[in-house]
Image (spheres, grey):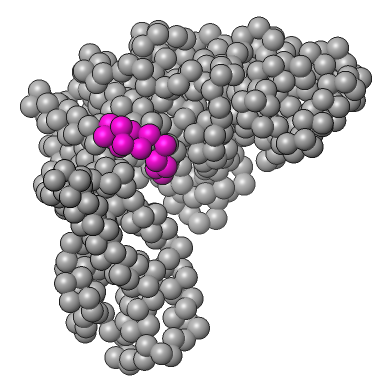
């Protein structure tokens, strides 16, 4: 009987999967729409969503979405006619078998601009409209059969987006779900905290089921085990900056990361000088570091700044207060700056060529009369400034590796605006008078390159900001200067690696590759400075920390072999080459 029930469950699952696969995909529906109806750049932005009833189309004008209309009906498995509101402006009709070049161009532009929707629809059954996550939750929780790994992942994603909707952000939130929160940290009530934790527990339970069913299932950020760990830590960090540390610790942090990720996180933290500020970008170079600070108290003097999260004023306020007992940061920004999203905007299209002194910028920001509500959103301030090219003076006695010190650095974004996180980074430097070293993980180059790139110097596995005279305006990150003595000391004395854990793509590979780049940069520089003994030592250290058994040596290791040959260690160079050729 149990065998029969299992067979019926598998058969039902297969039938449901076949039914879903028989429906048109997102790209097909987009092509169908643009062959018959108006283009978005003529008639407002078009939003195409997949809902329980089918694919819907709505027009978004001035950030407001009109009533959506059903385009493809799942029940009848057929396309429906849309109202005249979606017809071409001249009321002409383009036959489906005669797509014009202009139509094809519109399709390509639309698909390119909605890549996030396309990616999301590969992981969830419904998406693209307010409250989509509740329909996904209902579908999965009401299923009268065991959920597949894909469905457990979809359920976890839905609950995650439900939790972000409670806090007023995330893709397509239902505004009725959002808490009423005044600006600032610590404003959640006990009831709101409990509601948030309730949703988080359901999210983590779904991801826990996914890990139990298929630990190697590939999510959007890697295996299910990594997805679970990062989302636990994400919930912790969210409560840390929305409320306080005591509330955050109601999220259980234990046994989340494997030894390799933890050791690489230790390497990054231990790369930082005392009381540093470390800017990160992605999940893997942020959350394992927070985990170590919270569970082991490791390098809590270092303040982590995730560049994506640093757009939030609550997150900025948390950083200024000094998380985990770190020494608080000074700021020149007034309370008004943290009330809403404050964007500095150049009033004239043609920016003047002369850089604006940082003192003048912060004087403008200090005057609350300069803050006006943005015409695009009531939750955003605009502050008028004459230019986005900012000049920041450097203390005369600050140390610079190589002695190529500059009196000031130029902070240029080449955009007509400064977003809040860019202003915040400037504040970290200006208000703290360069006393708190500003450092970056290499992962920051995967995101928007910070305007400070020309002033970065390699120090081990991180890059540190110095007021140096840049050799180029926008240098290649791999060719940035390097603090040789500091880097050599870190590689030889501070760094370690758990070689028992295999490095696989979509998981540990990004940190592994970044470490190899940093090590090769030092090896190359030691040879350039005619220092063969230390070059050989670093080459052997790389072979020890990142053996072939852990992650097979590839073409990048041929570069390391070449540099070892230049340093006079032909035996090591030949060993690497033979290993690569044999594999």
User: Can residue 431 be seen?
Assistant: no
Judge by depth and name the residue closer to the eye, 297 or 241. Answer: 297
458 on left or right of 248:
right
Quadrant showing the N terminus:
top left
Position of residue 205 measured from the top left corner of the image (x, y, whole percent):
22, 32
Q: Residue at x 39, y 76 (%)?
A: 31
Position of residue 480 measured from the top left corner of the image (x, y, whole percent):
71, 31
100 on left or right of 404:
left
Which residue reaches farthest left? 191
What are the residue bounds of the magenta stretch?
Answer: 207-220
User: Can residue 73 be seen?
Assistant: yes
Q: How many marks?
A: 0
Q: Residue at x 10, y 23 (%)?
A: 190
Position of residue 166 measured from the top left corner of the image (x, y, whole percent):
18, 38
Q: Residue at x 32, y 40 (%)?
A: 341
Q: Residue at x 47, y 14 (%)?
A: 302
Position of residue 119 measured from the top left corner of the image (x, y, whole percent):
39, 54
Residue 403 lies in the magenta-colored region: no
Relative to 160, residue 508 above or below:
above
Residue 219 lies in the magenta-colored region: yes
Quadrant showing the C terminus:
top right
Judge by depth and name the residue closer to the eye, 372 or 259. Answer: 259
Judge by depth and name the residue closer to the eye, 301 or 206. Answer: 206
Name which quarter of the figure residue 538 lies in: top right
Name which quarter of the figure residue 492 lies in: top right
């Amino acid at each position: 009987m149990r065998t029969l029930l299992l067979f019926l469950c598998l058969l039902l699952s297969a039938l449901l999967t076949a039914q879903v696969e028989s429906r048109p995909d997102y790209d097909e529906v987009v092509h169908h729409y643009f062959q018959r109806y108006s283009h978005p750049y003529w008639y407002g932005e078009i939003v195409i969503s997949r809902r329980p009833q089918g694919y819907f189309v709505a027009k978004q004008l001035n950030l407001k979405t009109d009533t959506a209309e059903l385009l493809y009906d799942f029940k009848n498995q057929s396309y429906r006619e849309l109202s005249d509101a979606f017809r071409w402006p001249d009321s002409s009709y383009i036959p489906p078998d005669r797509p014009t070049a202009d139509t094809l161009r519109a399709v390509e532009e639309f698909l390119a601009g909605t890549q996030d929707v396309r990616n999301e629809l590969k992981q969830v059954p419904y998406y693209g409209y307010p409250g989509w996550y509740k329909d996904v939750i209902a579908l999965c929780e009401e299923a009268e059969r065991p959920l597949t790994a894909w469905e457990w992942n979809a359920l976890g994603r839905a609950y995650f987006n439900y939790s972000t909707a409670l806090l007023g952000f995330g893709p397509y939130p239902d505004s009725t779900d959002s808490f009423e929160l005044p600006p600032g940290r610590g404003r959640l009530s006990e009831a709101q905290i409990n509601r948030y934790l309730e949703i988080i527990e359901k999210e983590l339970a779904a991801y826990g089921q996914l890990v139990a069913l298929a630990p190697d299932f590939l999510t959007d950020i890697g295996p299910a085990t990594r997805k679970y760990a990062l989302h636990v830590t994400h919930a912790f960090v969210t409560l840390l900056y929305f409320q306080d540390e005591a509330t955050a610790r109601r999220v259980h942090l234990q046994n989340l990361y494997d030894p390799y990720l933890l050791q690489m996180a230790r390497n990054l933290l231990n790369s930082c000088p005392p009381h540093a500020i470390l800017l990160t970008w992605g999940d893997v170079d942020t959350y394992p570091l927070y985990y170590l600070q919270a569970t082991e108290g490791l390098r809590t003097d270092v303040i982590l700044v995730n560049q994506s999260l640093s757009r939030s004023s609550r997150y900025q306020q948390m950083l200024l207060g000094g998380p985990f007992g770190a020494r608080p940061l000074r700021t020149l920004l007034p309370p008004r700056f943290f009330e809403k999203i404050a964007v500095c905007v150049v009033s004239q299209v043609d920016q003047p060529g002369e850089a604006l002194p940082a003192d003048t910028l912060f004087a403008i920001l200090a005057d609350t009369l300069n803050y006006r509500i943005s015409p695009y959103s009531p939750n955003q301030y605009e502050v008028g400034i004459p230019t986005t090219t900012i000049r920041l003076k450097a203390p005369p006695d600050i140390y610079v590796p190589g002695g190529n010190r500059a009196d000031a650095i130029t902070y240029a974004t080449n955009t007509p605006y400064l977003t809040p996180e860019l202003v915040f980074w400037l504040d970290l430097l200006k208000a703290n008078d360069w006393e708190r070293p500003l450092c970056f993980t290499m992962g920051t180059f995967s995101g928007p390159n910070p305007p400070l790139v020309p002033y970065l110097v390699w120090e081990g596995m991180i890059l540190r900001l110095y007021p140096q005279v840049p050799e180029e305006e926008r240098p290649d990150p791999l060719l940035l200067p390097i603090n040789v003595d500091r880097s050599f000391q870190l590689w030889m004395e501070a760094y370690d690696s758990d070689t028992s854990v295999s490095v696989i793509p979509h998981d540990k590979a990004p940190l592994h590759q970044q470490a190899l780049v940093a090590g090769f940069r030092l090896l190359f520089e030691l040879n350039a400075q005619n220092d063969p003994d230390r070059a050989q030592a670093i080459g052997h250290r790389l072979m020890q920390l990142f053996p072939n058994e852990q992650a097979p040596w590839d073409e990048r290791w041929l570069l390391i072999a070449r540099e070892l040959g230049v340093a006079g260690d032909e035996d090591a160079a030949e060993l690497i080459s033979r290993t690569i050729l044999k594999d």
